[in-house]
């Protein structure tokens, strides 16, 4: 369904819009076709939850819950798309049933542009089985390297305002898309070698933003706190953000002259898979939208807190219906005299100007088994219409 620009008539015309475009007021005819480009490996994730412990050799345990969903870079791409960003993904897909389901889920359900993603014959999807026990995960993965590098597909992908990149990945194409006007948001993973070589951060010279977690940031900067780490990183990149889980987030944006700390939103976490991707996606949206730094961090903290209350990585990412529901509930509790809700309502009052004023579809969650073709057809629309979020 075509998205609407937002104006005073939207409450009438968008009564049954499929989604919400938070950048509608800023869009221009000559904008790139994509807001953000992502690239990386995809996995078919199977997640077992509700385990009291991990099974011992020779033992069989029954899990209380199970979910299947696209994983890997799909966590990030889905989080971006569910926030209304026009998202492209360059990834290699196989030709097995898992790949068919992930392709349909990402393209048709999440409306992610896969036009530059190749599919390979006689190549099977990488599979990860994850077991969640008391907030921690144990994983087993099987897969093979792609038949080729994806550089040419990335360079031929539709133009984007921003791209999310991994400092540990191939950087040969970074300069090219940067010269085309794409700004780069960088992340980095845990260094299993324990070296934390500062040379790993050299590619930040091409980047606009860097969003490591506190362990990564402190290890690379040889500092003892996230606050000190973010100041060190601000010497390397215009926009530095360090996330510290329940400890909150720290950021310095030299392009606007802002510095901010944001506490986390306290929730009971079910599965933290993909929470960092959701946080980074929300920060990227806020940056493209030109929001104040504090609002960007608070929105990102809220979005990631909503994600960890679901299990399943990519399909745990919140949509605008989830955000609107949370805000409506918070306002209702504040009006009812809930003191904590009153403070939260004050901190998040900027949401009044951001959340959609019309109803939007709910988003799908991870399912026990991957859906068949019919689940993305008429039945999915019928189910979605019964699950309006506002």
Image: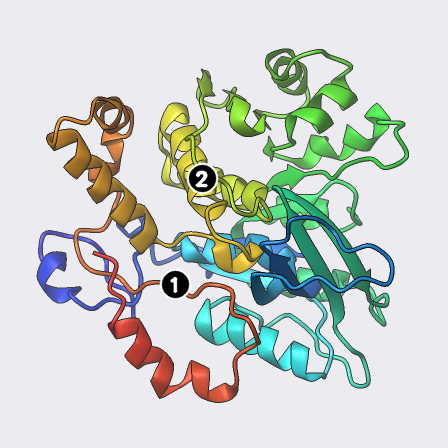
> In the picture provided, is 156 more to the left or to the right than 328?
right
Real-space Cα separation, disc 1 to disc 2, in angstroms: 16 Å
| Residue with the mark numbered 1 | 363
Picture quadrant of residue 231: top right
- 39 is higher (above) or lower (below) than 344: below
209 vs 328, nearest the viewer: 328
Q: Identify the residue at image location x=51%, y=64%.
A: 366
Q: Which circle's residue, 1 or 2, is located before the other in the chain?
A: 2
Provide the residue designation for mark 2. Answer: 305
Query: Which residue is depicted at the point 23% across and 24% down?
Result: 346
Residue 183 shows in this picture? no
Q: Is residue 101 above or below residue 76?
A: below
Residue sitting at the far front: 59
Along the horizontal axis of the image, is 25 left or right of 49?
left
Residue 174 visible at all: yes
State the image quarter where residue 348 is shown: top left
Q: Position of residue 113 (x, y in %)?
A: 52, 68
Q: Nearer the viewer, residue 205 or 196?
A: 196
Where disc 1 sits, the SS reads: loop
């Amino acid at each position: 369904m075509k998205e609407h620009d937002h104006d005073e008539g939207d409450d009438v015309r968008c009564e049954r819009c499929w989604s919400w475009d938070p950048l509608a007021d800023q869009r221009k005819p000559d904008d790139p076709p994509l807001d953000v480009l992502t690239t990386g490996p995809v996995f078919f994730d199977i997640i077992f939850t509700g385990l009291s412990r991990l099974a011992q050799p020779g033992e069989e345990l029954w899990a209380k819950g199970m979910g299947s969903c696209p994983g890997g870079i799909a966590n990030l791409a889905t989080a971006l798309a569910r926030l209304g960003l026009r998202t492209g993904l360059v990834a290699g897909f196989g030709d097995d049933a898992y790949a068919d389901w992930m392709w349909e889920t990402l393209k048709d359900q999440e409306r992610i542009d896969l036009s530059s993603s190749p599919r390979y014959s006689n190549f099977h999807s990488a599979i990860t089985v994850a077991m969640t026990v008391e907030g921690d995960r144990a994983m087993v993965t099987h897969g093979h390297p792609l038949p080729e590098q994806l550089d040419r597909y990335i360079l031929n992908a539709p133009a984007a305002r921003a791209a999310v990149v991994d400092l540990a990945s191939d950087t040969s194409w970074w300069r090219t898309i940067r010269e085309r006007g794409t700004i780069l948001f960088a992340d980095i993973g845990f260094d299993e070698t324990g070296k934390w070589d500062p040379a790993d951060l050299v590619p930040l010279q091409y980047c606009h933003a860097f969003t490591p977690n506190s362990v990564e940031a402190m290890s690379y900067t040889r500092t003892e706190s996230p606050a000190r780490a973010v100041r060190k990183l601000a010497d390397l990149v215009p926009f530095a953000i360090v996330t510290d889980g329940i400890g909150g987030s720290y950021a310095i944006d030299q392009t606007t002259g802002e510095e901010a700390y944001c506490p986390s939103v306290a929730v009971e976490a079910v599965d933290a898979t993909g929470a960092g991707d959701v946080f980074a996606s929300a920060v990227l949206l806020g940056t493209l939208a030109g929001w104040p730094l504090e609002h960007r961090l608070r929105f990102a903290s809220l979005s990631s807190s909503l994600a960890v209350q679901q299990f399943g990585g990519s399909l745990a990412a919140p949509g605008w219906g989830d955000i609107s529901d949370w805000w409506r509930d918070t306002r209702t509790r504040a009006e009812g005299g809930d003191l904590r809700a009153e403070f939260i309502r004050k901190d998040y009052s900027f949401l009044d100007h951001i959340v959609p004023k019309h109803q939007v579809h709910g988003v799908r969650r991870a399912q026990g088994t991957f859906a068949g073709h019919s689940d993305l057809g008429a039945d999915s629309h019928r189910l979605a219409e019964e699950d309006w979020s506002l």
